[in-house]
Image: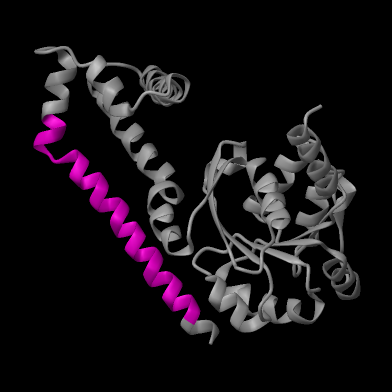
Amino acid sequence: MNSMDLKQTQVNDTFRSLHFCIFGAGSMAEAIVRGMTEQQLTAPDRIAVINRSNAERLHELQDRYGVTIELTAEAKQKRLAAADIIVLAIKPKDAAAALHDLKPLLRADTLLVSVVAGLSIATMQHIIGSAPIVRTMPNTSSNIGLGATALCCSQEVTAEQKFAAMTMLNAMGIVTEVEEPYLNIVTGLSGSGPAYVYYLMEAMIQAGMEGGLSQEQSHDLTVQTVFGAAEMVRRTGEEPATLRRKVTSPGGTTQAALEVLEQYQFANAMKTAIHRAEARAQEMGEQIGRNME
């Protein structure tokens, strides 16, 4: 075992010794729990899940993944105070109250990982002080372990804490680190991105049906086409533009179709849509910040 392997093993042992508390029990909280338990990154009893009132949902997660749940206010506070990593996975409207509740429970070395859309590090630290915070932007594909997540870190986050956060989030798909101002373009690109692909697939399925295919035939062919194209990019490592040129024969059917897309400025429409989502993310973040002042 070389030194790099040894260091990796030591860090992983450290990760497995951490205690996690996930504040919130929605789909993203479940995605994190599912990823860590299915990949056996840590023992399920080291993961606690709490929420404000929905005990039925907590029991569902406990039955499904074997995690610990807490139902009383006192038990929740003890669990939060003992956690090494707290994941804030709640709705933006509930964030201010949750952060005020968390403030007296945080230790100097407690890492807060936020998956709350639009909630900036500065806004969180305005309430809880200069704590180590990792802010993330995942997408809905995280629910099946194929997510794309970006994260940024406050200056208080240590290298070990960042590694732990990335290890946890990597269980849902891929993770990349960006500077905080770029989380808005991440929101426009990958955060909202699945909806663009679904919209494209809707149009493809409809066109197939208009051409005489059954709904099932058109659906199955479209799903496999999109899946295969994405997998082709991933496996070959080639750029989408290169692969597009390879399948576009001069004067052929693909070229004829692409000419129509160019006529309707498909690329410009897509880029404009992504930047509008980016701008909207900025607007929403500013509004959340004002509401929490």
Q: How many marks?
A: 0
Residue 31 visible, this angle: no
In the figure, 269 relative to 79: above or below? above
Is residue 172 covered in magenta?
Answer: no
Q: Nearer the viewer, residue 219 or 119?
A: 119
Q: Residue at 85% x, 71% y: name it.
A: 81
Residue 236: image location, x then y, percent:
43, 19
Q: Residue at 34% x, 58% y: name it.
A: 277
Q: Residue at 19% x, 18% y: name it.
A: 254
Is residue 285 covered in magenta?
Answer: yes
In the figure, 11 relative to 249: above or below? below
Tell whether 51 sits left or right of 31: right
Tell whether 244 sits left or right of 17: left
Residue 172: image location, x then y, percent:
63, 41
In the figure, 53 relative to 177: above or below? below
Residue 156 visible, this angle: yes
Tell whether 164 sits left or right of 177: right
Q: Quadrant of residue 88?
A: bottom right
Q: Quadrant of residue 220?
A: top left
Q: Quadrant of residue 222?
A: top left
User: Principal SS element in the magenta part?
Assistant: helix
In the figure, 21 relative to 292: above or below? above
Q: How is the image coloured?
A: one colour
Residue 228: image location, x then y, percent:
43, 20
**Quarter of the figure with the N terminus:** top right
Region rendered in magenta: 260-289
Tell whether 155 sits left or right of 71: left
Residue 6: image location, x then y, percent:
81, 35
Extreme residue toward the bottom, this view: 293
Q: Residue at 61% x, 78% y: name it.
A: 125
